[in-house]
Amino acid sequence: MTNSRNKGASFEREIGNLLTEDLGLKNNIRRILEQTREKHLPDLMLGRWYIECKRYGSGAEPLEAWWQQVLDATSEQGIPALVYKFDRRPIKVRVPLGAINSELNINAPYTADLLWEDFIFLLKNLYKEDIENHDL
């Protein structure tokens, strides 16, 4: 039987490593270890992005509670992102529609689920400042 805490921590490290590699960062993105003790902290941060990671065996759609968890962590000061993966399915990322189109309110309840590559494209093209500030 798999330990769900270890599985979650392993997925958080995997996503941190993927972000570091895919964005060409000099400084690694590391897990926020305090998140295991303090509520309302994300798993990872990149600039204004508050990233929650969920790895689950079966299913296709993330639970609404997962999205609510990342919304609670942002406290309207960051941009929420839910990275999730189910067995035999690609990594996906849920973001607010306002993160894609600046004409839309980032705090509106509307979301889009992106493939990992699309999320990286979004970061590289619309959030260069967050990437650059991470490497300072």
Image (cartoon, rainbow, N blue to C red):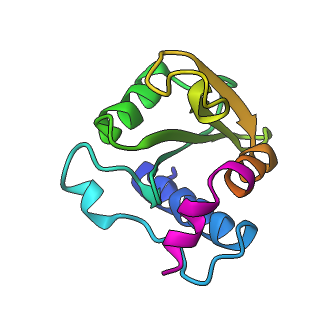
Look at 54% across and 66% down and name the residue there.
Answer: 13
129 part of magenta stretch: yes
Residue most extreme to the top: 109
Q: Dividing the picture into quarters, in which one does residue 35 lie?
A: bottom left
Secondary structure mostly seen in magenta is helix
- Residue 96 appears left or right of 100: left
Residue most extreme to the left: 38
Look at 64% across and 76% down and name the residue there.
Answer: 25
| Residue 28 horizontal/vertical position (percent) | 54, 78
- Residue 128 appears left or right of 42: right
Q: Dividing the picture into quarters, in which one does residue 72 lie?
A: top left
- Of residue 88 and residue 13, the one placed in the foreground of this image is 13
- Residue 39 appears left or right of 94: left
60 part of magenta stretch: no
| Residue 52 horizontal/vertical position (percent) | 47, 45
Look at 61% across and 24% down and name the residue there.
Answer: 103
- Of residue 58 and residue 24, the one placed in the foreground of this image is 24
Magenta range? 125-136
